């Protein structure tokens, strides 16, 4: 298991997650890691068990495998989405669902998202990234967004789409803003082209992945013209935004 940093203690009820996977080792890994990360966790080995636990305990988010012994994860999400909606965001038929599966075919990914999945992660996965995706899905489904993201002298305001560098306004196109927002929200982490395409251009983008390089070039001309460079290339891996080094 990757080393995880324990979360700060906060008041209130921890988010309740439901892990659905028929592999005992994966189920226990996720249950242990997510509890260590501050979540309350239930686990199920079959689709029927998952639907029963979801009905009885109203999870805040479901981590769902596709390959289950009694019904596949696609059928599970169909049945979850058929449940009555709750007045509480993300409850009842609206419960957020994050697929965690070995089924990595693009058609499976698209199918899961079209059925109402909120994200799709393939095995093997990085625990830190998975936990970050869980938090991101929970924020989106609750309508939460940080007031401001900051890296060095770069400031980005998600709600107003306002960007400044050293106090100077940086004007970006909608796609440039989405790309910068994704990199800044993951500051310090190298993001691959496939991760960027999935998050910025969404899963059904079927074009040339070199579009990422093109838009990185656009961003550099607008963001990195003055002051220390913030957008870096990690050759053979992807791109990262990080604080200037002293």
Image: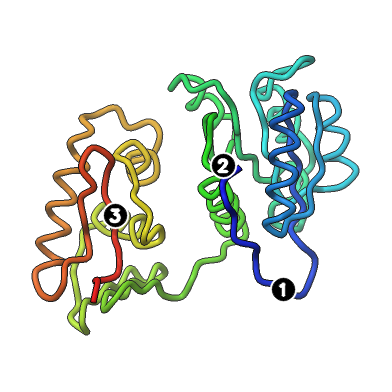
Characterize the local packing of mark 2: few (<14), some (14-19) or many (20 or more) Cα atoms within 10 angstroms: many
Q: Which quarter of the rendered picture does the N terminus lie within?
A: top right
Residue hosting label 2: 118
Characterize the local packing of mark 1: few (<14), some (14-19) or many (20 or more) Cα atoms within 10 angstroms: few
Q: Which label sits in the foreground, 2 or 1?
A: 1
Residue hosting label 1: 10
Q: CA distance from mark 1 to mark 3?
A: 30 Å
Helix, strand or loop status at disc 2: loop
Q: Position of residue 120 (x, y in %)?
A: 53, 35
Q: Earlier in the sequence, mark 1 or mark 3?
A: 1
Q: Which residue is rendered at x = 69% and y = 31% of the image?
A: 26
Q: Which residue is rendered at x = 27% and y = 74% of the image?
A: 154
Q: CA distance from mark 2 to mark 1?
A: 26 Å
Name the quadrant containing residue 223: bottom left
The reply to whether dot 1 and dot 3 touch (C-beta < 8 Å) is no
Residue 188 placement, left or right of 56: left
Residue hosting label 3: 240
Q: Which residue is rendered at x = 39% and y = 44% of the image?
A: 199
Characterize the local packing of mark 3: few (<14), some (14-19) or many (20 or more) Cα atoms within 10 angstroms: some
Residue 93 placement, left or right of 109: right
Q: Nearer the viewer, residue 187 or 198?
A: 187
Q: Earlier in the sequence, mark 2 or mark 3?
A: 2
The answer to whether any part of residue 114 appears in the image is no
- The outermost residue toward the right is 56
The answer to whether any part of residue 150 appears in the image is yes
Q: Which residue is rendered at x = 34% and y = 50% of the image?
A: 190
């Amino acid at each position: 298991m990757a080393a995880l940093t324990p979360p700060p203690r906060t008041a209130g009820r921890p988010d309740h997650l439901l892990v659905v996977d028929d592999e005992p080792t994966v189920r226990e890994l996720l249950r242990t890691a997510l509890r260590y990360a501050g979540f309350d966790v239930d686990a199920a080995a079959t689709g029927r068990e998952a639907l029963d636990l979801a009905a009885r305990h109203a999870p805040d988010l479901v981590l769902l495998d596709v390959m289950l012994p009694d019904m596949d994860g696609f059928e599970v999400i169909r049945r979850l989405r058929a449940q009555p909606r709750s007045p509480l965001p993300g409850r009842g038929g609206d419960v957020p669902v994050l697929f965690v599966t070995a089924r990595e075919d693009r058609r499976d990914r698209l199918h899961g998202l079209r059925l109402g999945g909120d994200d799709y992660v393939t095995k093997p996965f990085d625990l830190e990234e998975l936990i970050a995706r869980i938090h991101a899905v929970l924020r989106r489904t609750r309508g939460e967004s940080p007031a401001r993201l900051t890296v060095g002298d770069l400031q980005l305001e998600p709600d107003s789409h306002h960007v400044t560098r050293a106090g100077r306004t940086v004007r970006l196109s909608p796609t440039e803003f989405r790309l910068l927002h994704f990199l800044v929200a993951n500051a310090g982490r190298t993001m691959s082209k496939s991760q960027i395409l999935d998050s910025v251009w969404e899963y059904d983008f079927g074009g040339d992945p070199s579009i990422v390089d093109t838009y990185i070039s656009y961003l550099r001309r607008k963001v990195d013209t003055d002051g220390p460079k913030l957008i870096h290339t990690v050759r053979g891996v992807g791109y990262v935004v990080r604080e200037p080094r002293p």
